[in-house]
């Protein structure tokens, strides 16, 4: 069983970290079910284990938190659906790379519900969309923008953290960092792409895509 939790309002980052710590420990010891937690945070920046100081452009703009997850700097804030994924990867094949690929496929399947083609790019973490409405690059390639970020941490084969999808955040808030260390591409959202999608719409698509993407864990 995977428990789904949806939190209204804005959840403080420290509250989320404490919940994940406790829930992951309980999953490890067999005292709790796996969990998917959908929420929004107040505006903040998080630093992953690969974060570079130079990529924090505006350190005083919003609170900066040490996320202890993989990846670099990212932004969380209102209008962005944060999805914390506490799953037993030990029972799901013990393959971290495959698990991250499943997270990517989950996001892509979710975006497909809104006729958005999400794509993966080698060397660029997250899920990307092409922007034919934006100027092409010098080599003639279509402009691209990031719509979803992915970053996880593992403890005894149980995952922490997860992903975020931009529904309608203030995109100017990303200007205070170099998102995930990538300087040459922008950031977008569902509403920025012209789709009036609500959080409830996205949550439904996330759940449907999850059930198509992830198989139940194998029994021990």
Image (spheres, rainbow, N blue to C red):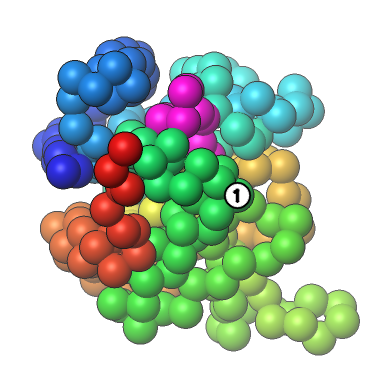
Can residue 133 be spotted in the picture? Answer: yes
Question: Residue 121 occupies which quadrant of the picture?
Answer: bottom right
**Horizontal placement of 65 versus 57: left or right?**
left
Q: Main secondary structure of the magenta part?
A: strand
> In screen coordinates, is 175 left or right of 200?
right
Residue located at (67% from left, 75% from top): 143
Q: Which residues are magenta?
A: 149-161
Q: Is residue 164 above or below residue 21?
A: below
The quadrant holding residue 89 is: top left
Q: Position of residue 168 (x, y in %)?
A: 33, 56
Measured along the vertical axis of the image, is residue 193 above or below residue 160? below
The residue that label 1 is drawn on is 97
Residue 25 location (% of width, % of height):
32, 16
Residue nearest the viewer, comparing 174 with 39: 39
Image quarter where the C terminus lies is top left
Quick check: is 155 in the magenta stretch?
yes
Is 200 inside the magenta-drawn segment?
no
Please name the residue shown 46% across and 30% down the image: 157
Describe the element under mark 1 as helix, strand or loop: helix
Place of residue 69 in the rendered image (x, y in percent of width and height, measured from the top left): 54, 28
């Amino acid at each position: 069983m995977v428990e789904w939790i949806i939190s209204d309002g804005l959840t403080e980052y420290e509250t989320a970290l404490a919940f994940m710590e406790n829930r992951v420990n309980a999953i490890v010891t067999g005292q709790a079910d796996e969990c998917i937690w959908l929420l929004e945070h107040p505006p903040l920046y998080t630093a992953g284990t690969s974060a570079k100081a130079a990529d924090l452009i505006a350190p005083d703009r919003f609170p900066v938190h040490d996320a202890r997850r993989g990846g670099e700097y990212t932004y969380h804030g209102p209008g962005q659906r944060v999805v914390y994924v506490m799953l037993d990867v030990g029972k799901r094949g013990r393959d971290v790379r495959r698990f991250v690929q499943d997270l990517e496929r989950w996001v892509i399947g979710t975006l497909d519900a809104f006729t958005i083609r999400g794509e993966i790019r080698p060397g660029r973490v997250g899920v990307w969309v092409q922007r034919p409405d934006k100027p092409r690059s010098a080599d003639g390639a279509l402009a691209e923008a990031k719509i979803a970020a992915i970053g996880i941490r593992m403890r005894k084969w149980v995952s922490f953290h997860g992903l975020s999808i931009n529904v309608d955040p203030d995109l100017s808030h990303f200007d205070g960092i170099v998102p995930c260390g990538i300087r040459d591409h922008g950031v977008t959202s569902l509403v920025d792409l012209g789709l009036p999608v609500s959080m409830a719409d996205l949550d439904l698509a996330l759940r449907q895509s999850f059930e198509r993407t992830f198989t139940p864990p194998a029994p021990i």
